[in-house]
Amino acid sequence: MKRPTTSLRNSGPVALENGSLKANIESYCKLLSLSSVGENYESAAHDAAKAKLSYQDYLYKLLQQQIVDRVDRSINARVKKAGFKYLASLDEFDFSFQPQIDEKLIRELATLSFLESATNILLVGAPGVGKTHLAIALGLEATKQRRRVKFISAEELTHELIAANRSNTITDYLEAIGRIELLIIDEIGYLELSREAASLFFRLISKRYEKASTIVTSNKEFQEWGQIFNDDVIATAILDRLLHHSHPFLINGPSYRMRGLREKNKNKSKNGGEKLEK
């Protein structure tokens, strides 16, 4: 018997495999990139028969699952591309440990309305107070909404800027990073920047000014930024652009890491005491 064929637009004739209905269905699913449908159609058919669903309802549920799986893969790809150094959510953040942080405002920012107005967020405080956690949590919310996000340390960003400048690709680099909807620059203040790096950093911030949002974390208060950039004028110009449309958070609370260390030592002492009692 001649094998059945079908014709797909711009693809030429496509021969179905000889074999069972199952093999032919799975062949079509693979051809159409409907991986979720191919994986779930049998179990979904069984559930539909038990629930006495109509053909339309059965098809709807299959396609709905395909969309959900495809969106999940898209989000996962965006999370990976963003370059977060770890994953963190707002639900994991202990606002009771840092009561001076405006939780209501942070959760409002998680709706991403600040992206529409190209508003910046500056998280300033000592190491361990949760600055990076909050920055990543907001960045993850942006990836869930399929926004373009880039997370990068200030040190790595400096290396990229200098490399682009010395290879005469700085214009293209700034154009590309200017299209990022949410740029997260982590840990400004741990290293002093050269005059070249400071100038390039200013160009980057100017490129994004009033066009796209930037989140910055820093262990240095704003009056100390002249030391970071080795130039008070450049530091003032950078801060002027970052702060013009912004939500600054000055966090003076205790360190989460130190709390964890204290709790760990406390448990060790407690367990050691219990062993001695035994």
Image: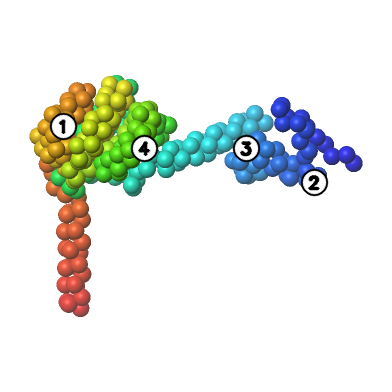
Single out the mark in the foreground, 4 or 2: 4
Amino acid type at mark 4? Ser
Disc 3 marks which amino acid?
Ser
Q: Alpha carbon of mark 4 to alpha carbon of mark 3: how far?
A: 41 Å
Label 4 sits on residue: 167
Helix, strand or loop status at disc 3: loop
The crowding category of the residue bearing disc 2, from other C-alpha atoms within 10 Å (few below 14, some 14 to 19, many at least 20), is few
| Dot label at residue 19 | 2
Q: Is the residue marked by circle 1 packed among few (<14), some (14-19), or many (20+) residues within 10 Å?
A: many
Q: Reply above or below: 243 against 277.
A: above
Residue 135, how many percent across, how many down? 27, 38
Which residue in the structure is indicated by mark 3?
33
User: Residue extending furthest right?
Assistant: 1
The residue depicted at 22 percent of the width and 32 percent of the height is: 199
Pointer 3: residues within 10 angstroms few (<14), some, or many (20+)?
Answer: few
Nearer the viewer's eye, disc 3 or disc 2? 3
Circle 1 sits on which residue? 235
Q: Relative to residue 100, is residue 110 drawn left or right?
A: right
